[in-house]
Image: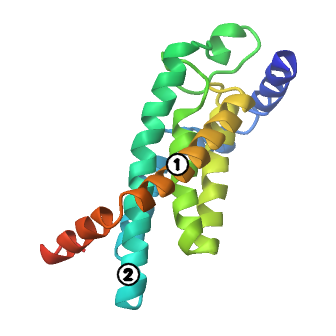
Amino acid sequence: MNSIDASLMIWLNGLSGHIKILDDLMRLIASDYLMPLVFSLSMFWLWFSGKTPSQRMTYQLTALTGISALAISNVVVWIINSLWNRPRPFLDHPDELNLLFYSPTDPSFPANPIAIGFAVAMAAWTVNRKFGLWLAMTASLYGFSRVYVGVFYPTDIVGGALVGMAVYGFTSYLRRALEPLITMVVRFARGVSVA
């Protein structure tokens, strides 16, 4: 599997370096700022969405769960990274890759930014299928761009996606277990005019 993963990564990265505008676009998408901003704004949008008071409450509870899943995903990735330090592909295959990005120093597996993206996408999916699908496609594009620029293996992306989805499932369970406390937090936020 490792050789298939490396071969696929080298092939996808081999698409780079031929069309400058595509390379620039992939660098922009792979950046540490654009997609995390998109994911954060999507939770912000969810928080302030809903046509009826009941729907707004559902959206706000979902946004709170999504933000919690985002945070917990970071912790889960950190734990996995401390147990298994998988080197980045540009370290394993320096002569075969065209690195279009800075050289991250943290372990490769699982892809933390993708875990965050899929945690947010799962949250959106539970209340708005189209928006959730759009975010999942955005997170997938983010993952592809990270392989394209040479900083992740494809299995890092798949691992990150699985972590994000699993953590969202766990966070949803946790939210139900902590009711009515979570609803009280949202009502408090509404009382102080933040919701």
Q: Which residue is mark 1?
A: 170
Q: Which residue is mark 2?
A: 56
Near-viewer residue (48 or 165)? 165
Question: Left or right of 154: which side holds 24?
Answer: left
Mark positioned earlier in the residue sequence (1 or 2) = 2
Q: Quadrant of residue 96?
A: top right
Q: Residue at x 31, y 63 (%)?
A: 182
Please identify the quadrant where the N terminus is shown: top right
Near-viewer residue (166 or 184)? 184
Q: Is residue 41 visible?
A: no
What is the C-alpha distance between the residues marked 1 and 2?
23 Å
Q: How many marks?
A: 2
Q: Position of residue 145 (x, y in %)?
A: 65, 40
Q: Residue at x 64, y 43 (%)?
A: 161
Q: Secondary structure at mark 2?
A: helix
Please identify the quadrant where the C terminus is shown: bottom left
Identity of the amino acid at label 1?
Phe
Q: Position of residue 102 (x, y in %)?
A: 50, 23
